[in-house]
Image: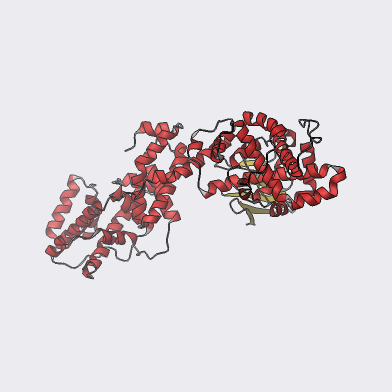
Amino acid sequence: MVEPGLIRAAQSGDRDALITLLREIETHVYRTAYYIVNNEQDAMDAAQEALIRIYTKIGSYEEKAQFKTWVQRIVTNICIDKFRRSKPTVSIDEHEMVFQEKQNVEDEVLSTYVAKDIREAIDKLPEHHRAVVVLRYLQDFSYNEIADSLDLPLNTVKSYLFRARQQLQTLLHDYQKGGVRG
Amino acid sequence: MTCQEVMDYMQRQLDGDLDERETEILMSHTRNCPDCAEMQERLSRLSSELENLPKVTPAYSLVDAIMPRLEQIELQRQETEPEEKPAPRRRQAPDRSGKSWFQRYRVLSGVVAAGLVAGIFMLTYNPQNMPTALEKSSAGDHTAADSSLLRTNVTVQSSNQNTAGNEEQNGVASDEPAMKSKTEESQESTVQPQQPGQSPDSEVRPEPHKADSGKESPPKKPANRVTASSPSDSPGKHGNSAPSEKELQGSEVSSGSERSGSGKNEASDESSKEAPDMAFAPPADAGAEIFNEQKSFTGTAQAQQAVSPNGLYSAEVTDKTVSIQSTDKQELLFRGGERDGVISNLVWSEDSLTLGYDVQDSGGDIFHYVIHIKDGTETKQ
């Protein structure tokens, strides 16, 4: 949480305050970028670009919005617009509400998904679904905060998040069944 | 309640979005529906794993990494506010990013070019000497540019008690008034031998750049002449017996560009003269000080104007063409083709990268054109 006073100082032209502010948010900016672009180098680039944009646009931030959602909007936009790769994403509808066959519950409890598998699964999601998941889980954002950040209606946010989780669950389950994680 | 509806509850439960009554409904369903119970189990496991994803941090400080670029942004901002003194931090952290240097090169090139033209003119102005001087000046273009560059550096150094290194000059240079007066002094005393270290740096390419502006060449010289012999010109300057032609060029160059600063009336002449020259990129270091001389090129015909959202560019309609200038330095960045019709609706894109405008021809048809400022192209839509 960035101090409102710091933000105001930065907006009023206090350059040191602005730099301090950037330092406070850089990790959050990077983290979002990292999980959206799923690549360290691109994440560094995207995060730097976002910070520069924040630096130059700080004057346009209005207090009626939360600062953190304003920041996340900038970084997600950059990630989605500039670091879009043509890569296969799953169609989010094709697995809709398929209930899995029963498995040995004990097996599942013992095995935990490794982070890498989860990242790969997240990477397969369509961009906005991915962004919703990242904001929900890496930034601890509420539905409303996600809606503000991504400029999406609240219901769309929920629908994206629910479908994304459903999709991830299916993908990870497939990994597991395919013995991917050995 | 169907399993499908329960699914929605499960999802919302993961986000803490269920009230007590809804929680109860969910629980009672899953108690009796093993499929849903299992789905709930999986989803909540997934959710907690998502929550436990590594909280990655950048490998190095991103703010530190972008500092040079931020400095550059500050620098550009200060250039847009001429009355503001440059902050000392510019000196502490010289800019290294390629872009920023590029910006400076462009400006420098303008002044070198202007000086070059002025120098050539001064040489050729001597009527007796005309043919030979012309020959010489085309042969000696490099040296002319060299000395103009050198001159600028010398000027700045003298205003800084000769302590400044090249980098430091950038910071010092913007001290405009001081520099102005020193410039005058230095016109008298400046003449210094060409420094060996300077010349490789100063390998400007005036030729191609003259070619760029070739269209404007013929009117350019007269225009320059006016400038050069404007009232502030001290008499006897021409009479100054310079040690060598090289030197003469140099001193004329610096006086020429300084004078053009005071000659506001000729500003539009000046800026159009400057403009096409921006295309080539001369070396670094002398760039910043040049800014200040250039700042005084103000005042262009006020026609239809549109300043870009980022405040860096100003577009205007003149003589059936749309031209774009940088707002701070009045350098012409782009001049569009001549349009046979009425130009209107200058509209910048939000990112300040493109400018659109409409042309209504005599038949009343409206055509839309878009200028891409970055690559200097203009397309008909």
The residue at 44%/48% (across/down) is: A49
Tell me which corner region of the image, top left, top right, bottom left or bottom right, holds residue B293. Answer: top right
Q: Position of residue B146 (x, y in %)?
A: 67, 46
User: For this view, does B146 lie left or right of residue A86?
Assistant: right
Which of the two residues, B33 or A170, is positioned nearer the viewer here?
A: A170
The residue at 23%/66% (across/down) is: A181
Q: Position of residue A174 (x, y in %)?
A: 25, 67
The residue at 38%/57% (across/down) is: A127
Which of the two residues, B89 or A131, is positioned nearer the viewer here?
A: B89
User: For this view, does B363 lie left or right of residue A104?
Assistant: right
A57 over B58 or under it: above or below: above
Visible residue check, residue B207: yes
Visible residue check, residue A151: no
Q: Position of residue B108 (x, y in %)?
A: 63, 44
Coloring basis for residues: secondary structure
Farthest-out residue, right: B128
Quadrant in which the N terminus of chain A appears: top left
Farthest-out residue, bottom: A178
Q: Position of residue B362 (x, y in %)?
A: 75, 52
Q: How many discs appear?
A: 0
Which of the two residues, B253 or B322, is positioned nearer the viewer here?
A: B253
Which of the two residues, B379 or B198, is positioned nearer the viewer here?
A: B198
Quadrant in which the C terminus of chain A appears: bottom left
User: For this view, does B347 lie left or right of residue A101?
Assistant: right
B188 over B35 or under it: above or below: above
